[in-house]
Amino acid sequence: MSLIDEEGRELPSFEAAFKEAVIAARAIMGNEVASGYLCLDCHIEIVDSYGTTLAAVPFAEALTIQP
């Protein structure tokens, strides 16, 4: 499943965008876990104002999984 944020957010730097993507991924995963589902293969893409993908933040890399 793919969700697209049509409005997006402008942030002052790539680093700020990356941090926000990690926070958003964790929030989405929290909601997924609460409903009994978790997609570790999902990711959030960081794009510039032209729609060019600058990076992808995999959900699995937005947290530490411990046994």
Image (cartoon, rainbow, N blue to C red):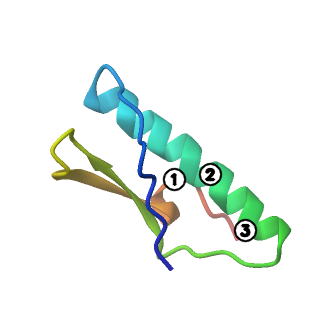
Mark found first going from the N terminus, 1 or 3: 3
Spatial CA span between label 1 and label 3: 14 Å
Q: Dot 2: few (<14), some (14–19), or many (≥20) neighbours within 10 Å?
A: some
- The foreground one among 60 and 32 is 32
Q: Secondary structure at mark 2?
A: helix
At 32% from the left edge and 29% from the top edge, which residue is drawn? 15
Q: How far is mark 3 from mark 2, CA to CA?
A: 10 Å
User: Is the C-beta separation of discs 1 and 2 under 8 Å?
Assistant: yes
From the viewer's perspective, is 46 left or right of 21? left
**Residue 14 position in % (x across, y down):** 27, 32
Looking at the image, residue 2 sits to the left or right of residue 33; the answer is left
Name the residue that disc number 3 marks.
32
Q: Which mark is residue 62?
A: 1
Q: Residue at x 43, y 64 (%)?
A: 43
Q: Nearer the viewer, mark 1 or mark 3?
A: 3
For label 2, the residue is 26
Q: Position of residue 62 (x, y in %)?
A: 51, 53
Please determine whether, in this image, residue 28 is positioned above or below residue 39: above
Quadrant for the C terminus, please. bottom right
Label 1 Cα neighbours within 10 Å, binned few <14 / some 14-19 / many ≥20 = some
Tag 3 secondary structure: helix
Which is nearer the N-term, disc 3 or disc 2?
2
The answer to whether mark 3 and mark 2 are in CB contact below 8 A is: no
| Element class at badge 1 | loop
Give x and y (percent) for residue 2. Answer: 46, 73
Q: Amino acid at mark 2?
A: Arg
Lower position in the chain sequence, tag 1 or tag 2: 2
